[in-house]
Amino acid sequence: MTTTYAPRQTTTRGHTVQIDNIGMYYEEYGVGTPLVLLHGFGGCGQNWLPFTAKLSERHRLIVVDLRGHGRSTNPENRFTHREAASDVFLLLEKLGVGRFSAMGISSGGMTLLHMATSQPKRIDSMVLISATTHFTDQARVIMRRASFEFMPQQVREMYRECAKRGDEQISQLIDQINALGESHDDMNLTEQDLSSIAARTLVVHGDRDRFFPVEIPVSIYRSIPDAALWIVPGGEHAPIYDPIVPFTSTALRFLDGPDSKLESAAEHLAGAAIGEGR
């Protein structure tokens, strides 16, 4: 059983800034060290609403609508994770943010991988949720055939809630995910690329993910220096929405943990995955 992917938001508290040719929308919550939150494809910043209250107690949250999503525009009607990474860096420059931590769900995690490999000194720690270094054949089939009518109901509800410009925006996003199914030059990160990442990294993945099999997060974990791995038993794509998964407490424990002794941190996370909330 999962909660709503994009809970309804009755008021907005965000801002739109010009990033090259797009208007980029973001919201801020809390105070403290910056924590950038990046949603998955078809979603928006509202994907983080189930978690913002607790996260904002200890961090300054910067919750972004990626290009063409939510209230952010995308005149070129093109989406790549590499361009999305550049957008986020430009936004952070406008906000005067130097170093930061970050979390990303699916496409948000893929955007983070491009950020962490292109400017590794900027990110202190990050959590990658249901991300991948490349699109598998099974993922490409799903992406090429994606259509609004045949999406699971909860995913359709998320698209409806997040697409602030209505059916035209939904249609554009579907075209973009279809195009990603044919792309081979956007997500093509190698083990050598990942080995350059300096951020303390927690890799979170469900062992029943229909897009990206569990071998991918294991490979990411092994390729990023001193990473930690949390495989959620029975978890599907973006397993953090399952109410029995102790995501917020585990993520905060990792993000705020020491910069050393990552082996003990990984052991602590493994214990949380097995015991807390179950």
Image (cartoon, rainbow, N blue to C red):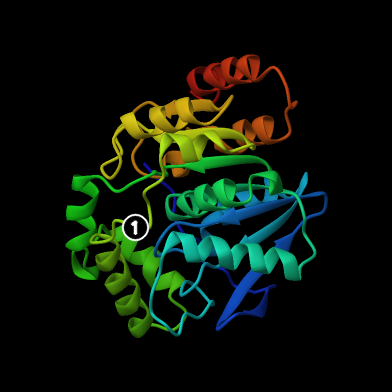
| Residue 67 locus on image (x, y percent) | 50, 72
User: Which percent across, then down, holds residue 2?
Assistant: 40, 45
Q: Eyeballing the image, is 100 above or below 156?
A: above
Q: Nearer the viewer, residue 119 or 249?
A: 119
Point 33% across, 78% down: residue: 172
Relative to the observer, which residue lies in front, 140 or 63?
Answer: 140
**Where 209 sits versus 159, above or below?**
above
Q: Residues within 10 Å of mark 1 (few under 14, many from 20)?
A: few
Q: Position of residue 128 (x, y in %)?
A: 51, 41
Q: Kindly give the residue lying farthest to the front in the view shown.
A: 192
The answer to whether one can see residue 22 in this image is yes
**In the displayed structure image, the side of residue 11 where residue 57 appears, left or right:** right
Instruction: Tell me the quarter of the picture where residue 220 sits.
Output: top left
Q: Residue at x 54, y 50 (%)?
A: 112
Residue 141: quarter of image: bottom left
Residue named by callout 1: 185
Q: Is residue 258 above or below residue 112?
A: above
In this rendered view, identify the residue nearer to me: 126 or 206: 126
- Residue 273, image x, y percentages: 50, 23
Taking the spot 65% from the left edge, 20% from the top edge, the residue there is: 262
Secondary structure under the numbered disc 1 in the rendered image? loop
Which residue: 58% across, 47% down? 116
Of 198 and 239, the residue lying toward us: 198
Q: Is residue 64 visible?
A: no
* Callout count: 1
From the viewer's perspective, is 104 left or right of 5? right
Quadrant of the drawing holding the N terminus: top left
Q: Amino acid at mark 1?
A: Asp
